[in-house]
Amino acid sequence: MMEAALRAAGLGSWRYQRLPVPPELLAETVAALPAAGFRGANVTIPHKQAALALAQKVSDTAREVGAANTLLFEADGTIVADNTDAPALLNALPIDAEQTTALVLGAGGSARAAVWALRRAGAGEIRVWNRHLDRARSICEELGCRPVSNAEPADVLVNCTPVGGDLARGWFKQLPLPADDLAMFRCVVDFVYGRDETALVRAARSFGLPTVDGLDLLAEQGALSFERFTGVPAPLEEMRAAVRRR
């Protein structure tokens, strides 16, 4: 996706590469990137909260969310943390979030971004579920939402857990809702992405619900990161097409 964007924007000398980094090497790796010629980095599970702590400058969004998915490296080596997950969700959401109710599954960096975005959009009530209720309580105390131990009807369902894949493997059993309960939502958002649509998105579409899948969000947040990295407008349609081809 990013390579397609660089080509479309005429930035042929730029490169985007994958860097698998275990948690214990995150700080050391990030500190070395500016001197190695990197302009920035996208950060994913499980590093989003840890990445925030590594930055010398933090955007208002990343500070309020409490997690960063985008790092920028200034000429003097200063690390700047930002979060594009939150605005990406608002850009992609198929309904007006104002005065809606929402159920967010998960309590990691993406969940924090989702809660922040929905609050910013004026959602009336946001509930957070996590397998470990204390983690749900923690995020709710910080961001002003309500922890729940079971799924309740809501306008928006947002899955921010890393769970995904095949119904045959009992995927829904790991979440607080069976597939036939999805009718209690007006739309479904799934941060998980892969080669195929997730079981959650597939089930939601079978009910005729509007959905936002992980590839939609990947392209939206990637476009925002691209603009921060390069300083030029992102070719969003080319990025969407590239990620769908992949």
Image (cartoon, grey):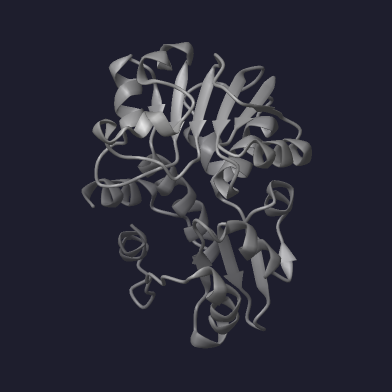
Up/down of 144 relative to 22, above or below: above
Where on the picture, by quarter, is residue 132?
top right
Q: Where is residue 22 in the image (x, y as percent from the top left)?
A: 48, 70
Up/down of 34 relative to 167, above or below: below
Left/right of residue 144 with respect to residue 227 in the rendered view: right
Question: Seen from this angle, which residue lies furthest bottom?
Answer: 35
Residue at 53 percent across and 80 percent down: it is 33
Q: Can residue 235 be seen in this view?
A: yes
Question: Seen from this angle, which residue lies furthest left?
Answer: 245
Up/down of 220 relative to 210, above or below: below
Where on the picture, by quarter, is residue 208?
top left
* Total tally of numbered discs in the picture: 0
Residue at 50 percent across and 40 percent down: it is 160
Q: Position of residue 91 (x, y in %)?
A: 51, 36
Q: Where is residue 51 in the image (x, y as percent from the top left)?
A: 62, 64
Q: Where is residue 86 in the image (x, y as percent from the top left)?
A: 59, 43
Which quadrant, please, contains the N terminus? bottom left
Residue at 43 percent across and 34 percent down: it is 174
Left/right of residue 198 with respect to residue 62 in the rendered view: left
The residue closer to the viewer here, 126 or 75, is: 126
The residue closer to the viewer here, 186 or 76, is: 186
Q: Can residue 123 be seen in this view?
A: no
